[in-house]
Image: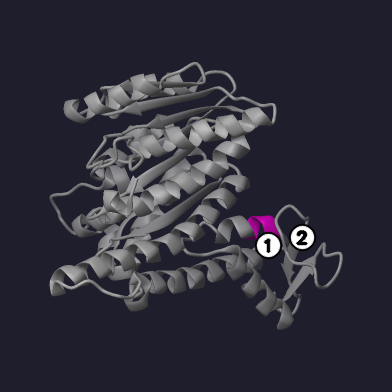
């Protein structure tokens, strides 16, 4: 696979980078205990240019899970691995089916189904519900309607299990104020309240509301959102919504988010250079990053979310006599573009100002970490 395989669909490259990084980490963690099932509900392939389909979500998942199983087998644990790839349109399904049949083996069972996944939810649930299986569900529809909570509710409720959903935020924010468009299945019956918002506030509210609905419907402890930029403009295309019941899942996804953020700049720099060269008709001597125009939209998102998350952590501290660092960590990291380093900065700021007391440190220089028994409380004079 080459960079040209993603030309004019760089947003897919960024999305696939995130999915690969997350699945590599999560499958290795969970595969040491569970058998693994991966379900791609809207597999395609769409606009794939690689003969081995390494530029598709299902192709990436297969390669990652194959490598993971081989690695775990060397360590004495060879989990059962199964993949279910679903596509409702006949022409892409034929390609998907050929891929599945060619790769199906005793080591990794691969199967394709020509389904509208919303009409086969019960079949997917049965497939995922075998003993000692941990399902990963990917819902990546071409539009936003198939991401409606009522349609996917049984998949969200699979326990154990984790879900990644592509939320087409750019489409949704465009239609919030359209009286002919009913977004209640996606954002709740009170979605009309969002019409009072605009710009980045509207986008944040849409994403946050959907995350809250996924969390509530599936009984998840944590739901994170990873923004994916449009390659050719300073705007967000969609968000990858990730739901998990374990803090280790949050850690794996946030690590993937940080590394995807770096890759986003690389991808966008390449896209910008191609645009300049096509416009001028001349090749450039410099690397793409030299003339790269960094996205202001992402910088603003990160800044806004750090302020939102900081306020949220302060509110948690104000409302509790004592709260664990782990709970603050999990709450803060559910905000897009917010990381553990941000949380530590806020806590250090408050501690130096005498507003916060940290319990459980063995020494003053000890760095606050999850699973180390640290707890936090506001100073008496602050409360």
Give the numbered dot on residue 227.
Answer: none
The residue that mark 2 highlights is 374
Q: Which residues are magenta?
A: 324-328
Considering the numbered disc 2 on the image, is that residue within a helix, a strand or a loop? loop
Name above or below for residue 367 compared with residue 192.
below
Q: What whole-number distance in Å separates the C-alpha atoms at marks 2 and 1?
A: 15 Å
Residue situated in front as seen by the camera: 366 or 214: 366
Return the x and y of residue 179 as percentages of the image width and height: 14, 54
Is the residue marked by circle 2 packed among few (<14), some (14-19), or many (20+) residues within 10 Å?
some
Q: Secondary structure at mark 1?
A: loop
User: Where's residue 118, x and y in %?
Assistant: 29, 29
Relative to 3, say whether 44 is above or below.
Answer: above
Tag 1 residue? 320
Residue 122 visible here = no
> In the image, is residue 369 above or below residue 61?
below
Q: Is residue 327 magenta?
A: yes
| 264 or 326, nearer to the observer | 264
């Amino acid at each position: 696979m080459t960079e040209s395989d993603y030309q004019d669909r760089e947003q897919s490259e960024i999305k696939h980078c995130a999915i690969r990084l997350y699945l590599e980490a999560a499958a290795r963690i969970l595969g040491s205990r569970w058998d693994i099932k991966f379900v791609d509900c809207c597999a395609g392939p769409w606009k794939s240019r690689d003969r081995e389909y390494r530029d598709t979500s299902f192709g990436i998942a297969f390669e990652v899970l194959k490598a993971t199983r081989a690695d775990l087998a060397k360590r004495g644990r060879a989990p059962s691995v199964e993949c279910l790839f679903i596509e409702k349109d006949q022409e892409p399904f034929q390609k998907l089916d050929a891929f599945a049949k060619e790769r199906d083996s005793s080591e990794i069972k691969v199967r394709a189904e020509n389904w509208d996944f919303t009409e086969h939810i019960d079949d997917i649930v049965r497939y995922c519900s075998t003993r000692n299986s941990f399902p990963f569900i990917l819902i990546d529809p071409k539009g936003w309607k198939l991401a409606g909570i009522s349609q996917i509710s049984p998949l969200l409720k699979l326990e154990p299990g984790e879900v990644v959903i592509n939320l087409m935020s750019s489409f949704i924010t465009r239609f919030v104020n359209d009286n002919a468009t009913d977004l209640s299945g996606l954002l709740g019956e009170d979605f009309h309240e969002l019409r009072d918002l605009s710009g980045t506030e509207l986008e944040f509210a849409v994403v946050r509301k959907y995350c809250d609905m996924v969390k509530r419907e599936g009984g998840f402890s944590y739901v994170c959102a990873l923004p994916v930029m449009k390659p050719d403009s300073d705007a967000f295309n969609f968000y990858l919504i990730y739901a998990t019941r374990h803090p280790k899942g949050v850690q794996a996804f946030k690590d993937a988010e940080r590394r995807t953020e770096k890759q986003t700049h690389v991808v966008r720099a390449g896209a910008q250079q191609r645009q300049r060269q096509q416009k001028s008709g001349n090749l450039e001597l410099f690397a793409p990053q030299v003339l790269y125009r960094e996205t202001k939209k992402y910088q603003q998102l990160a800044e806004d979310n750090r302020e939102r998350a900081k306020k949220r952590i302060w509110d948690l501290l104000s409302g509790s006599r004592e709260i664990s660092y782990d709970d603050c960590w999990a709450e803060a990291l559910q905000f897009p573009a917010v990381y553990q380093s941000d949380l530590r900065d806020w806590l250090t700021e408050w501690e130096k100002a005498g507003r916060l007391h940290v319990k459980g440190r063995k020494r003053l220089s000890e760095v606050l970490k999850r699973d180390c028994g640290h707890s936090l409380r506001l100073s008496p004079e602050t409360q």
